[in-house]
Amino acid sequence: MLKTEAFKEIKQNAEREYGGLDDFRMVAAFLVVAIHTSPLLAFTETGDFFLTRILARIAVPFFFMVSGFFVLKGENTDRTVRKFMKKTAILYGISMLLYVPLNLYNHYFQMEDFFKNFLKDIFFDGTFYHLWYLPAAIEGAAVAYFLLKKFGNKGALSVSLVLYLIGLFGDSYYGVIKGIPVLSGLYERIFSISAYTRNGIFFAPVFFVMGSIWAGKLSAGKGKPHHISFVVPAAGLAECFLAMTAEGILLHRFSIQRHDSMYVMLLPTMYFLFWLLTAFSQKGNPLLRKMAMLIYIIHPYMIVLTRMGAKALHMEKWFIENSLLHYLAVSVESLLCALLLLCLWKNWKERTDGLRKGGRRREGTRKERILEKDVRSTERAWVEINLSNLRHNAKTLQAIMPGQCELMAVVKANAYGHGANLTADCLRKEGVRQFAVASLEEGIALRKHGITEEILILGYTDIRRSRQLKKYRLVQTVIDYEYARELNACGLHLPIHIKIDTGMHRLGIDSRHVEQISGIFHLSCLKVTGIYTHLCVADSLEKEDVEYTENQIKRFYELLDVLKVKEHPDIKVHLQSSYGLLNYPGLSCDLARMGIALYGVKSALGDVTRQKPDLLPVLSLKARVGLIREIEAGETVSYGRTFTAERDSHIAILPIGYADGLPRNLSCGKGSVLIHGKRMPIVGRICMDQLAVDITGEEGIKPGDEAVLIGRDGLEEISAEELAYQADTITNELLSRLGPRLKRVPVF
Ligand SMILES: *Cc1c(COP(=O)(O)O)cnc(C)c1O
């Protein structure tokens, strides 16, 4: 598959299940337009009341709820909520400026008590009639976030319901308390600050909280709402909406309403609506999100435009007096205008991106995208990552783990050369929730890329950088007791995994030092969320090595018994890496740290393991023939003149060298490459950026043809294991050294 599409698909899949929500955003946007144009007014007043004051009243709560759903979910809430508030504030600022001309036209700036009212508008009512939504979204998100953090789901729901109740009596139920002086006095106070209780304090929070709780519920079900049926939410929605209709009509009939945004039945109606929409499993569409928001922001302008246009063309009868046509005209104009703005914005972004990124091709200009279209036809050398093999490996490994054991994907060293972002994106989509890296930087890079799952740092991190551990929610490995104490002394509350040395003698606290280890549990700032060890000869089935490993395992489990770790279900226990799992399956633990096996290769050629799952290699290394030259018998090729042609020869020069991570000791015939499905020797010394291949006798090879250095070509294959063997190393080293100059191209 082509690369642009690949990236797009990865991005979209991250949010695939909630396409129903995106579709409904458009419905909601046009409902809001209806509120401000009263489409049925010319025909039936009750009908219009129903449409605009009851039905359309689900639109804004829906927007709040969907924001709560995406913004206040999961563990990275801190950052997303801040980002949401900032984005909304910017949008609010732009919108306010956008409406200044209409404000001027309406003599807005000549209002009495200008400064006070202006502040009131900015914080609550909006400087134009529909803009109240934006401050309400910011405040609602903030209040909901605060409540959720402080009181948890139930508490936040209760408090926000109380707020809603207070709001209710200033809105649809105002008539009930109007006669009670104490209360009506109180509400007058409220109204002097915010014209309605339909604002970010009383109205919005409950919907944000509901959205957040719903998101939590779905992700607890592993994010896939397929099992939820449609019947229950559809029936619930119908019933509640009917009741809300009755409620609205009664309140209206008895003139109890001061305003008509808030109903009691609105809450269960929203609950069932959301349930129904998330029960649809389909791809999300970010475009619809932007479009709905633009329609919301610009439709008042379109109302003005329609009126002015109708007057200018003497078509008032059609487009003003006929409320339905008026509504349709405003809707169509809003839609077109939104489309136009999106196109302009995209164009502008492409141009600036193109400038900023220079030669780098990522969502660049049109020209760059054409290049991108098939990166493999233009790249000099590249790495192909077979994502379906990666998925297959993850599933296969997970299948041989005991029931409660979860796969922890080790994506250190750029995922063993496979591209950490690409790999992690693919795996999280498969449901992998645990990642491990070697260093702080690797963890931060994954976070910045948007990986929100657990990330464990296996290696050393300087204590002075503990703030970054906190900031990026990374779990640090405590590598000895002193380290734990120093980390604790930073005063930051941090989750940690304790590393136990059972015989590898690298990082970790000696398993015999029980007092030190249990001391870590008592350090006030550190929260032990995991404990693990590492096996050092798990790859060998020699008797002595098996004994050594079994001894390591025994020490580890004895320690766990002494520490009574079993009594703490939230402490993750793990000890196997790839060979640990393949040779010692069935050990009781919570995680298995999979590196090399996940990538579908063995460390060394001929490694035999007890478990032999069918793992598939994920990575291929390819280069293009750059040049073909003829040399005469007796001439030499490359540095040091190590290769002398015995006959008149054809030599292909490939633009890949040791700076790309191809080991230099594959020089002089030790290594080979596949071209046109045939194996041909690397001759002469491998250079930093180039190497030579003897293709004599092979007709039809031309510059631009593909050469395979790792991978399959027709019936021939050069496995990573073979190449590592020829280079006197193991695949782990070979792959993890493949350098950043090589583009990682996903294939499916
Ligand atoms: C790298 C590493 C792993 C993964 O090892 P593989 O053999 O590639 O599966 C597991 N645990 C620790 C501590 C590591 O450093």
Image (cartoon, rainbow, N blue to C red):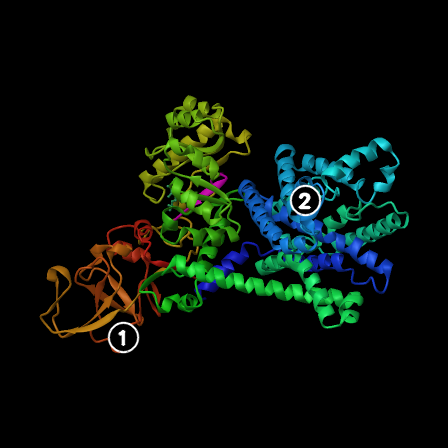
Image point (88%, 47%), residue name: 255
Label 1: few (<14), some (14–19) or many (≥20) C-alpha neighbours in 10 Å: some
Question: Foreground residue, 238 or 91?
Answer: 91
Asked if the stretch drawn in magenta spans residue 491, the answer is no
Asked if residue 723 lies left or right of residue 143, the reply is left
Query: Which label belongs to residue 287?
Result: none
Residue matched to label 1: 701
Could you tell me residue 359's position as x and y percent?
36, 61
Q: Quadrant of residue 280?
A: bottom right
Could you tell me residue 495's position as x and y percent?
48, 33
Check the picture and name the quadrant holding the N terminus: bottom left
Asked if residue 585 lies left or right of residue 245, the reply is left
**Number of marks in the image?**
2
Question: What amino acid is at disc 2?
Answer: Asp
Cβ of mark 2 under 8 Å from ligand 1: the answer is no
Residue matched to label 2: 121
Rendered position, 574 above or below 228: above
Asked if residue 523 lies left or right of residue 214, the reply is left
Circle 2/circle 1 CB separation < 8 Å: no
Question: Foreground residue, 288 or 496?
Answer: 288
Image point (39%, 24%), residue name: 513
Could you tell me residue 664's position as x and y percent?
21, 55
Does the rendering let one see residue 232? no
Direction front: furthest residue? 110
Quadrant for ligand 1 reads top left
Q: Which residues are drawn in magenta? A: 587-596
Question: What amino acid is at disc 1?
Answer: Ile
